[in-house]
């Protein structure tokens, strides 16, 4: 076996991606100086919860954290997948934070993954579960992931700070991902939206839908926004409402925008925010997200700026063939992803800016990751 050589990293940035890429590429890592100078040093609650999640879906992985949580030693195991797994997410971040790495881990598992997550389903920081169901899963299908067995069921909503939501994610296994040539965005042919309200009046949803449709109806006829009013145990433990909008183009690209307003938001100290007194009306939220979606469409590219990281990782994990994708202006998260991919998988992307549309065409040769643990039937 010999001595394990660890890749040494520093700092708390892009913690989630480092863990994910370390696991996929089977590279043991040591991260030092995690928020060493902060008032609350070390790993935060959601980061510890993410480590637990990685332990749940894989076998034989070794996690060592020092007392203050500022140093982490992680040796990845074999991604097992499996049925009926359950994970309670930390309530400081929503499920969007946990779902992105889970999607990719599930693909390269030994068995198909089926896991129930409990916690906060929607918050303003991470992509909502509706965005995952209606945009992120479609991106995976582009790379040859079969659509049967790929699903996200929303069983109960949960808004911050108390959570109480539940979703069930199922991901099939793949042998390898197929490389893509995906540079045409095409025109938008339809817009679909999903609003939800939990433990508040459904009037919030009506005003958001009305405001958002007011903007889109001047532009295209095929706009439909579904509502999803939850009450009782399915509404989780905190009041709130939210909206997710997804535009689908004729070339099969999905551009999304979403937000959530929680009506009982408390900050880290447990004090209720000032926000509660001066919360803006629901119409403004509808208008804001509709305008944001139009802004994302205007930027161009085959995915919106929140999905750039996922897209780049998928391109880098493909078989050893050339992938070519077009994105809008690079988001900071996208840039960070490109750096991490170079560090862990040795995949470098070449850029070709397209000044006429202010987009960028990225080309890369996949690392040819093969799922060796998958059982061949």
Image (cartoon, rainbow, N blue to C red):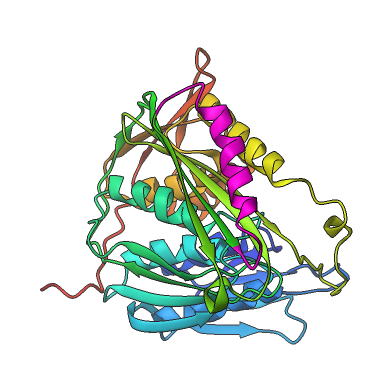
Q: Horizontal and vertical percent for residue 203?
A: 63, 52
Residue 349 or residue 335, whichever sits in front: 335
Q: Horizontal and vertical percent for residue 88?
A: 55, 81
Residue at 23% over, 72% down: 374
Q: Is residue 173 above or below residue 342?
A: below
Question: Quadrant of the image for the N terminus?
Answer: bottom left
Residue 3 can be seen in this image? no
Q: Is residue 362 above or below residue 245?
A: above
Question: Quadrant of the image for the C terminus?
Answer: bottom left
99 inside magenta stretch: no
Q: How many marks?
A: 0
Residue at 42% over, 34% down: 302
209 inside magenta stretch: yes
Which image quadrant is residue 211 in? top right
Residue 228 appears left or right of 273: left
Residue at 59% over, 70% down: 158
Q: Horizontal and vertical percent for residue 267?
A: 82, 67
Residue 75 or residue 115, whichever sits in front: 115
Residue 20 or residue 282, whichever sits in front: 282
Q: Horizontal and vertical percent for residue 186?
A: 36, 24
Residue 51 appears left or right of 10: left
Q: Residue furthest top?
A: 356
The segment highlighted magenta reads 198-221
Residue 184 or residue 259, whichever sits in front: 259
Residue 274 can be seen in this image? yes
Residue at 84% over, 75% down: 270
Q: Residue furthest left?
A: 377
């Amino acid at each position: 076996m010999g001595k394990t050589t660890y890749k040494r990293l520093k700092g708390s940035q892009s913690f989630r991606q480092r863990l994910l890429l370390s696991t996929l590429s089977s590279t043991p890592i040591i991260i030092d100086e995690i928020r060493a100078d902060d008032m609350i040093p070390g790993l935060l609650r959601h980061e510890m919860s993410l480590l637990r999640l990685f332990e749940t879906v894989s076998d034989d992985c070794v996690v060592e954290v020092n007392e203050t949580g500022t140093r982490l030693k992680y040796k990845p195991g074999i991604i097992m997948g499996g049925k009926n797994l359950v994970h309670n997410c930390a309530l400081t971040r929503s499920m969007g934070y946990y779902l992105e790495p889970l999607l990719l881990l599930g693909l390269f598992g030994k068995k198909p993954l089926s896991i129930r997550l409990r916690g906060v389903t929607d918050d303003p920081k991470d992509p909502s579960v509706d965005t995952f169901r209606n945009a992120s899963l479609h991106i995976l299908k582009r790379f040859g992931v079969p659509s049967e067995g790929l699903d996200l069921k929303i069983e109960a909503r949960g808004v911050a700070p108390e959570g109480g939501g539940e979703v069930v994610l199922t991901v099939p296994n793949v042998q390898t991902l197929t490389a893509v040539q995906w540079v045409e965005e095409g025109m938008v042919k339809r817009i679909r939206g999903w609003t939800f309200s939990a433990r508040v009046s459904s009037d919030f949803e009506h005003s958001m839908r009305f405001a958002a449709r007011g903007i889109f109806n001047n532009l295209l006829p095929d706009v439909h926004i579904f509502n999803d009013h939850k009450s009782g145990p399915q509404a989780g433990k905190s009041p709130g409402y939210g909206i997710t909008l997804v535009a689908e183009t004729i070339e099969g690209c999905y551009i999304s925008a979403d937000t959530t307003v929680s009506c009982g938001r408390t900050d880290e100290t447990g004090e209720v925010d000032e926000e509660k007194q001066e919360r803006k009306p629901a119409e403004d939220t509808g208008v804001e997200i509709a305008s944001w979606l139009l802004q994302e469409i205007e930027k161009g590219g085959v995915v919106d700026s929140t999905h750039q990281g996922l897209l780049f990782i998928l391109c880098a994990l493909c078989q050893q063939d050339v992938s070519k994708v077009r994105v809008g202006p690079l988001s900071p998260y996208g840039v960070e992803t490109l750096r991490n991919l170079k560090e862990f998988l040795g995949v470098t992307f070449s850029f070709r800016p397209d000044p006429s549309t202010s987009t960028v065409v990225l080309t890369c040769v996949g690392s040819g990751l093969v799922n060796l643990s998958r059982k061949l039937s």
